[in-house]
C-alpha cells in the first residue's frame, strides 16, 4: 500500500528537508507500522479515504500494546508530517492528523551519572589495549565533555576538530551548526588517537571509525557507551544521551549560566534546557538543610 507515496516522502525528507539518516529511518519504521495496521483493517483503503478515525484507532492500539506516551506521540508526529507532505502535493485534500492530540507525556527527570562516576570512567576504568580501547575512551570523553548528541558524534569528521583553537564544529538538528569549546586534555587525547589511527592506515575522514576504516554506526556507539557505563552505574539507562544529560547537569551544578548551557546543547529554546535544573534545585535544598539554623525545625 502507498509504496510510491512513501518512497517520494522519504526522498523529500532526505533531499529537501535534509533530515538525518536516523530521522528518516524512524519515519520509515513508523509509516511501515501504520500501513501494516491499515492493510489488516482494510486492504482496499485508498490514500484519500484515510480519516482521523483510522489514525485514532491506530494510536489507541499502539497505547494498548504498552507503548509510552513518547512513542505514541512520535508515531503521531511522523504521520502528521507524512500527511502534510501529501496535502502539499495535492495527494490528499486535508491532513487528518490535525484533529488529533497525542497522550500527555509524563514529566520524567533526565537520567545522568554523578560526578564521582564520571571521574571513575576516566581515572579508574581500564580500557582495551590498542586502537579500539583508545577510540572507545575518546568516544566517551567527547560525549561527556561536549554534550553532543549521538547522531552529531557519529557524523563528526577529523576536520571538525580545531585542535589549535580547542573547539569542535557540530552540525545539529535542522542543519544548525554550532561551535563547542573543549579542554587541553581532550586535545591531547584527540591528537594521540589520530596518530594511532594514521599508524593503522585508517584514512577515513570520519573521526570515529572501526578497525575496518568504516564510520561507526549509531548501534555501535550505543553499545560502547552501554558497556562502559555498566561498569560505573547500576542505573537502568546507559545510553549516549545519559552522558549528554550528565554534561548539562554537572555544568549547572557547578554554576554555569543556563543560557550558555542552552547554546552548548544546541537547544532551540530555554525550556528544553530547564529540565536539567532539577538537580541544581536538589543541591540547593541540601545545602540549605545543612547550613540554615532553622532548617531542622
Image: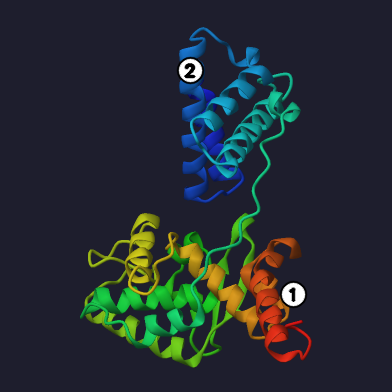
Residue at left 56%, top 73%?
A: 169
- Name the residue beneath numbered marker 2: 1
- Name the residue beneath numbered marker 1: 259
In this view, 222 is above or below 34 = below
Give the structural element (helix, strand or loop) at label 1: helix
**Can you tell which mark lies on residue 290?**
none
Image quadrant holding the C terminus, namely: bottom right
Residue sitting nearer the eye, 184 or 42 = 42
Q: Position of residue 254 (x, y in %)?
A: 64, 85
Residue at left 66%, top 37%?
A: 103
Image-based side of 37 in relation to 225, left or right: right
Residue at left 60%, top 16%?
A: 47
Q: Residues within 10 Å of mark 1 (few under 14, many from 20)?
A: some
Q: Residues within 10 Å of mark 2 (few under 14, many from 20)?
A: some
Image-based side of 198 in relation to 36, left or right: left
Q: Position of residue 179 (x, y in %)?
A: 61, 76
Image-based side of 117 in relation to 111, left or right: left
Dot in front, 2 or 1: 1
Q: From where the camera sits, is residue 197 visible?
A: no
Q: Position of residue 241 (x, y in %)?
A: 50, 63
Q: Quadrant of residue 50?
A: top right
In this view, 2 is above or below 114 = above
In this view, 224 is above or below 217 = below
Residue at left 36%, top 64%?
A: 226
In this view, 107 is above or below 81 = below
Give the structural element (helix, strand or loop) at label 2: loop
Q: From where the camera sits, is residue 189 visible?
A: yes
Query: Residue reaching furthest front?
Result: 297
Query: Residue reaching furthest top?
Result: 44
Amino acid at each position: 500500500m502507498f509504496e510510491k507515496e512513501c518512497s517520494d516522502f522519504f526522498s523529500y525528507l532526505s533531499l529537501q528537508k535534509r533530515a538525518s539518516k536516523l530521522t528518516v529511518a524512524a519515519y520509515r519504521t513508523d509509516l511501515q507500522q501504520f500501513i501494516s495496521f491499515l492493510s489488516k483493517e482494510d486492504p482496499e483503503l485508498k490514500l484519500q479515504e484515510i480519516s482521523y478515525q483510522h489514525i485514532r484507532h491506530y494510536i489507541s492500539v499502539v497505547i494498548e500494546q504498552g507503548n509510552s506516551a513518547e512513542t505514541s506521540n512520535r508515531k503521531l508526529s511522523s504521520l502528521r508530517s507524512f500527511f502534510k507532505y501529501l496535502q502539499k502535493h495535492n495527494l490528499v485534500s486535508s491532513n487528518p492528523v490535525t484533529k488529533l492530540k497525542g497522550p500527555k507525556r509524563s514529566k520524567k527527570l533526565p537520567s545522568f551519572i554523578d560526578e564521582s562516576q564520571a571521574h571513575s570512567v576516566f581515572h579508574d576504568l581500564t580500557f582495551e589495549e590498542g586502537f579500539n580501547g583508545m577510540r572507545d575512551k575518546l568516544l566517551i570523553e567527547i560525549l561527556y565533555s561536549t554534550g553532543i548528541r549521538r547522531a552529531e558524534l557519529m557524523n563528526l569528521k577529523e576536520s571538525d576538530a580545531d585542535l589549535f583553537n580547542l573547539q569542535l564544529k557540530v552540525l545539529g538538528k535542522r542543519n544548525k551548526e554550532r561551535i563547542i569549546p573543549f579542554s587541553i586534555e581532550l586535545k591531547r587525547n584527540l591528537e594521540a588517537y589520530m596518530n594511532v589511527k594514521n599508524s593503522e592506515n585508517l584514512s577515513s575522514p570520519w573521526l570515529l571509525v572501526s578497525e575496518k576504516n568504516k564510520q561507526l554506526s549509531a548501534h555501535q556507539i550505543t553499545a560502547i557507551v552501554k558497556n562502559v557505563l555498566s561498569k560505573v552505574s547500576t542505573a537502568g539507562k546507559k545510553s549516549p544521551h545519559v552522558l549528554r544529560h550528565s554534561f548539562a547537569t554537572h555544568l549547572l551544578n557547578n554554576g554555569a549560566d543556563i543560557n550558555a548551557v542552552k547554546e552548548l546543547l544546541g537547544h532551540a529554546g530555554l525550556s528544553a534546557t530547564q529540565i536539567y535544573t532539577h538537580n541544581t534545585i536538589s543541591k540547593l535544598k541540601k545545602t540549605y538543610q545543612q547550613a540554615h539554623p532553622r532548617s531542622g525545625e
